[in-house]
Amino acid sequence: MDPTPERLINQPAGLPAGQTCQSIAADPGAAVSAGLRPQDFPCRPNNLAFANMISELGFAIAPTAFYPARTTGIGGFQVSFEASYTGIHADRSVASSNGGRMQYWHLGTRGPQDPNTKQSSIVNSSPDSLLQVYALKARKGLPLGFEIAGSLGYVSNTTFWVGGGDIRWSMLEGFRTGALGFLPDVSVGGGIRTVTGTSRFYLTTLGIDARISKPIALQDSSQLIPSLGFQRLIIFGDSNVVDGTPNVDAVAQCGFGGLDATTGAPTCRNKLPNGTDANADFANNFTFDKVRVHRNRGMVALNYRYEMIWLGSQVAFDISDPKDENPGIVGKRQWTLSFEGGVHF
């Protein structure tokens, strides 16, 4: 499930039957001999496919805001292990330039590896329907009802690592008796998560949330803590330069001789049959449009504490359809189911 955004491309118009921008790049001499100009058939990015894949991946790695509204307190500290499972639309597709449809998870992720040749398939025929994120999380209470948290984890079946931090303020912290003691705890906060482990794009998510919770005392020094929350999620996806023809070495094909001092274009020692430089493959490098997606999430959680033992589960879900606020996003609502276990002292 590692990303392969170089496959999310639109084929140029006017291609001869049986040809692709990749096949022309691989054998530009044959294209010239057939009366074609290789520079007229560059691979172009399918920005819709990239945006939809980033949107769903961003939902999976976003801050879970998985905590009650009451902080650990000035002297409190919590360490826990968190497992989150997010549903993605593995078979959903977007429009392609040739009039067909492109399944962005099938093309945009690496498929299984052949055990004999050690080569990955060119299409992931069965992408995971769940993205699994496992993280170690720590929370520490501060004076005046503030709390900070840090998280470090990885996405299963990928090379992704996810890290980030949170800060929040519990505005009613300290009211335990009297009339105010009947009010639920209320907190506001924010968190950020970013991904490392890929050179193809940058992905960062920002969550701004509000929560309410109320601890229910049980016997034997235990508590049950239900909570509700809302999160405004913003997903930032920025593409690096992507090579749409990764099996063709543009520098070697060109016989790169440096940049032209006047135009800045690459000069080539190798020539095509018509005498022009063999530099068309440089045009197959591109970047996708920036992705900025806004989503609204609801959160319902239940935590259990017995002395130092801390357990919990939460479900986070889209309140509104992502396409309502984000033109071009075709994916339907998503959900994340999270579990955690740790110590609270």
Image (cartoon, helix red, strand yellow):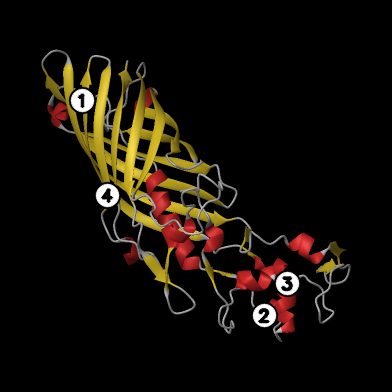
At mark 2, the secondary structure is helix
Which amino acid is tagged 2? Asp
Which amino acid is tagged 1? Tyr
Does residue 209 lie above or below 180 as drawn? below
Quadrant including the C terminus? top left
Q: Which of the two residues, 345 or 112, is positioned nearer the viewer here?
A: 112
Which numbered dot is residue 280? 3
**Disc on the earlier residue, 1 or 4:** 1
Q: Which residue does the numbered mark 2 point to in the structure image?
A: 40
183 sits left or right of 315 in the view: left
Q: Which residue does the numbered mark 4 point to in the structure image?
A: 317
- Residue shown at 58%/52% (left/top)? 200
Distance from label 1 to label 4 (Cα)? 22 Å
At mark 4, the secondary structure is strand
Distance from label 3 to label 2 (Cα)? 9 Å
Distance from label 3 to label 4 (Cα)? 46 Å
**Disc on the earlier residue, 3 or 4:** 3
Q: Looking at the image, which residue sits at the far left? A: 219
Which amino acid is tagged 4? Phe
Can residue 266 be seen in the rendering of this structure? yes
At mark 3, the secondary structure is helix
245 sits left or right of 160 in the view: right
Q: Which of the two residues, 154 or 220, is positioned nearer the viewer here?
A: 154
Density class for disc 4 (Cα within 10 Å; few <14, some 14-19, many ≥20) is many
Q: Looking at the image, which residue sits at the far bottom? A: 35
